[in-house]
């Protein structure tokens, strides 16, 4: 790694870390608050507001399972690092309490009444009608009670392992002899909304149904108190890859153990019995800081399904409560011979404005084409019914050489990747389970085909996963080419991943952990030199997170040299922007909207000869040093114009952009011209349509789809 710190500090007093960097965890909470602002925005359609509330809950769960769990473990140790961890944990928990309070206030005071006004109501037990009580009694008897298990807690029956993220009730019982006992009952992981018969669109929560019928589980006892709660556990997986005899088998065991990891957070519903709350804290070995009290239903991710429930009401589907349908282009419109199209010129697709289906079809065509000899691909996260994996399996069964690197350690997708790995092996593909010590996050596909004039490599490099479902929700870029230099680089990288070849001198790729950091740092430093010499110097980049201190220091040094820097950072950003004497020419913008901004574009002015690259990597230490990532330099003038247009549109947005201030807060940008907003989403839709026209292909729409569906866990 380049000695970035020495560059920054050359001839300058060393600033304390807190003056130079924001804490990444607090920056993440600030990002999730920006997501919550979408739910709080009354201009956002109702169903979308409900889904943003669900996204906040989903994001918080992952944050607790990963980062809070790590800090909690560190805080239990001794020493300076443990002291720092305890202080940071306190700040995180304060931030989470404020975030939860605002999230549930939005739910209670705004979303619940508005849903009721549109015909969907969640009815509390005290408001159930007589007919509701009777039908719910039958539901309890026939469907719920058979799958519910009461667990007593006493000297012979220890406190059970509460499943991770399950909704559970603690019960205090009083026997006929007056003796007090405690028990635990876990709510089955079924649909949370139970339809009531008294009126269309009325529902009970499953946990309320269980709580109402608890007496039936404990005959001979009186229920004296109850407390509805939820436990979030440590989601980390620890495997010694050097010693692992079978990574797949050991990972399966770790997945089983993860559901039983150390408790990190206890959520309790407001009004729960305080004695039971203390009992749970004691049994779970959590202090007061690890407890969150919520003023509404636990786990608002059930709101992902609200739109479907509304569509089932007598009035039918409600497009007025959703974002307008996204017009998606099938581009190029003719794809009968993708080999001819790609060999005729590089192709750049901007998803989801342009359908990911062309990428799927490329793999499917390769599987069927008798001229295709080999297919090599990396897979990190794929959909549950992936057409790409099915095509790869089909190609292997047809005798083609199919090599797939499946990253088994893709966090929270490990189980799905294990299933796909086994399916591909059964089909005859050669499956590689990643690399020891590194996650393979690069998005690479190489197809070797015998064309009329000899063998040719057709390559696809992307900024996002080969996932046909999330490609409808995330903005990403796909680059297709048969450029020989790119083909040589991709082939060499695959040889490194699957064999023991030595790292080559890459021509068009920057590869982590080999050359990505040095390439990025080299370009940043070159911009600083251009600025000092009076030549044009600018850096513009769009990505998901900036948490690498070395990159921050390089950007600080470039800013002090006079480089104009614009960073479009969706999520975490530890860099302090616009600080006099530190980062005077750096501007940071966070774009939050109806789609998850996932594309990564890096642009360096290079004294008037700009360098553009798209990448799978963010400016995070893990991406630069601990993962296999790739960036490809784009040199096709047509594609460069397009990348610049995307950057310009995102920078000019005044609908969803928040600008980072020197004090670390974000301020939402408002339209400069009332009634004439520069909305990036709408303008990118127009840009895609115009691109199709400029390419001479005309506009061809795929079947329209809604960009968010039931069950989508969109990680904003």
Image (cartoon, rainbow, N blue to C red):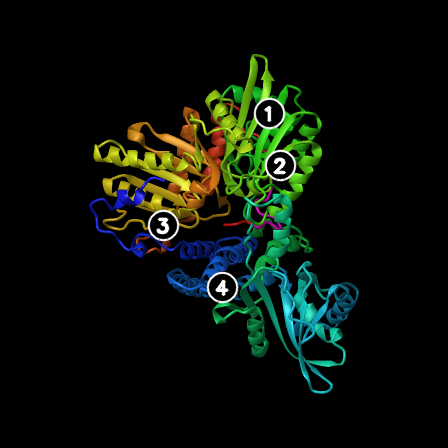
Q: Which residues are magenta?
A: 702-713
- Residue 242 vertical placement versus 291 (above, below): above
Residue 695 appears in the rendering: no
Q: How far apart are the alpha carbons under marks 4 and 3?
A: 23 Å
- Residue 223 vertical placement versus 111 (above, below): below
Which of disc 2 and disc 3 is earlier in sequence? 3
For disc 4, the neighbor class at 10 Å (few under 14, some 14 to 19, many from 20) is: many
Q: Which residue is mark 3?
A: 659
Residue 710 part of the magenta segment: yes
Q: Are marks 4 and 1 in contact (CB under 8 Å)?
A: no
Q: Which residue is mark 2?
A: 703
- Residue 255 vertical placement versus 293 (above, below): above
Q: Which residue is mark 1?
A: 335
Residue 454 appears in the rendering: yes
Give me the residue at 68% from left, 54% from top: 312
Q: How far apart are the alpha carbons under marks 4 and 1?
A: 48 Å
Q: How far apart are the alpha carbons under marks 2 and 1?
A: 16 Å
Q: Position of residue 594 (x, y in %)?
A: 50, 47
Which of disc 1 and disc 2 is earlier in sequence? 1
The dot on residue 100 is 4
Q: Are marks 2 and 1 in contact (CB under 8 Å)?
A: no
Magenta stretch secondary structure, dominant: loop
Apparent side of residue 7 relative to residue 657 in the rendered image (left or right): left
Local SS, label 1: loop
Which of disc 3 and disc 4 is earlier in sequence? 4
Which of disc 1 and disc 3 is earlier in sequence? 1
Q: Quadrant of the N terminus?
A: top left
Q: Position of residue 337 (x, y in %)?
A: 60, 21
For disc 1, the neighbor class at 10 Å (few under 14, some 14 to 19, many from 20) is: some
């Amino acid at each position: 790694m380049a000695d970035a710190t020495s560059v920054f500090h050359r001839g300058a007093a060393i600033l304390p870390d807190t003056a130079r960097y924001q804490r990444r965890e607090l920056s993440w909470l600030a990002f999730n608050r920006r997501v919550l602002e979408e739910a709080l925005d009354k201009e956002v359609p109702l169903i979308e507001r409900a889904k943003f509330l669900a996204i906040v809950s989903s994001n918080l769960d992952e944050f607790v399972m990963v980062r809070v769990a790590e800090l909690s473990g560190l805080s239990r140790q001794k020493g300076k690092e443990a002291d720092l961890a305890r202080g940071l944990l306190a700040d995180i928990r304060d931030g989470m309490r404020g975030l939860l309070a605002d999230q549930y206030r939005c739910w209670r005071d705004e979303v619940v009444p508005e849903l009721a006004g549109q015909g969907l109501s969640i009815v509390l037990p005290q408001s159930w009608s007589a007919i509701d009580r009777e039908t719910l009694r039958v539901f309890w008897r026939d469907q719920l009670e058979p799958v519910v298990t009461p667990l007593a807690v006493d000297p012979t029956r220890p406190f059970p392992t509460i499943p991770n993220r399950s909704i559970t009730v603690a019960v205090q019982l009083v026997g006929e002899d007056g003796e007090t006992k405690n028990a635990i009952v876990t709510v089955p992981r079924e649909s949370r909304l139970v339809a009531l018969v008294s009126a269309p669109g009325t529902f009970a929560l499953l946990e309320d149904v269980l709580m109402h019928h608890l007496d039936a589980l404990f005959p001979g006892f009186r229920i004296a108190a109850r407390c509805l709660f939820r436990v979030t556990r440590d989601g980390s997986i620890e495997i010694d890859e050097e010693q692992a005899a079978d990574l797949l088998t050991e990972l399966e065991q770790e997945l089983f153990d993860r559901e039983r990891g150390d408790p990190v957070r206890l959520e309790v519903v407001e009004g729960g019995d305080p004695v039971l709350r203390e009992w749970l804290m004691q049994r779970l070995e959590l202090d007061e800081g690890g407890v969150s009290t919520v003023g509404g239903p636990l786990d608002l991710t059930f709101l992902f399904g609200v739109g479907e429930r509304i569509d089932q009401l007598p009035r039918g589907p409600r497009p007025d409560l959703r974002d307008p349908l996204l017009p998606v282009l099938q581009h190029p419109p003719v794809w009968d011979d993708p080999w001819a199209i790609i060999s005729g010129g590089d192709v750049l697709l901007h998803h989801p404005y342009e359908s990911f289906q062309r990428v799927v079809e490329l793999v499917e065509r390769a599987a069927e084409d008798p001229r295709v000899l080999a297919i090599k691909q990396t897979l990190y996260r794929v959909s549950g019914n992936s057409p790409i994996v099915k095509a790869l399996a089909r190609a292997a069964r047809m005798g083609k050489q199919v090599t797939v690197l499946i990253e088994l350690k893709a966090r929270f997708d490990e189980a799905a990747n294990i299933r796909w790995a086994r399916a591909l092996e059964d089909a005859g593909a050669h499956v590689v389970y990643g690399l020891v010590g590194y996650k393979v996050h690069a998005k690479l596909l190489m197809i070797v085909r015998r064309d009329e004039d000899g063998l040719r490599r057709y390559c696809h490099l992307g900024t996002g996963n080969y996932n046909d479902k999330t490609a409808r929700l995330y903005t990403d870029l796909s680059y297709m080419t048969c450029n020989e230099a790119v083909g040589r680089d991709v082939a060499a990288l695959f040889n490194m991943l699957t064999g023991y070849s030595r790292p080559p001198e890459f021509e068009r790729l920057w590869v982590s952990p080999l050359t990505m950091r040095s390439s990025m740092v080299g370009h940043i430093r070159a911009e600083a030199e251009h600025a000092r010499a009076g030549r044009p110097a600018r850096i513009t980049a769009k990505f998901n997170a900036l948490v690498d201190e070395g990159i921050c220091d390089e950007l600080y040094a470039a800013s002090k040299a006079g480089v104009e820097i614009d960073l479009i950072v969706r999520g975490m950003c530890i860099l302090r922007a616009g600080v006099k004497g530190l980062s005077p020419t750096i501007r940071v913008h966070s774009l939050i909207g109806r789609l998850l901004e996932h594309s990564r574009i890096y642009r360096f002015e290079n004294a008037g000869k700009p360098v553009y690259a798209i990448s799978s990597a963010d400016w995070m230490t893990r991406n630069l040093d601990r993962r296999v990532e790739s960036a490809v330099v784009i040199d096709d003038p047509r594609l460069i114009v397009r990348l610049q247009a995307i950057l310009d549109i995102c920078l000019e947005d005044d609908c969803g952009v928040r600008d980072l201030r020197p004090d670390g807060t974000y301020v939402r940008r408002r339209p400069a011209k009332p009634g004439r907003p520069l909305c990036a989403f709408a303008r990118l839709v127009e840009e895609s349509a115009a691109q199709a026209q400029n390419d001479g292909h005309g506009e061809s729409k795929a079947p329209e789809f809604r960009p968010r569906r039931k069950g989508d866990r969109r990680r904003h």
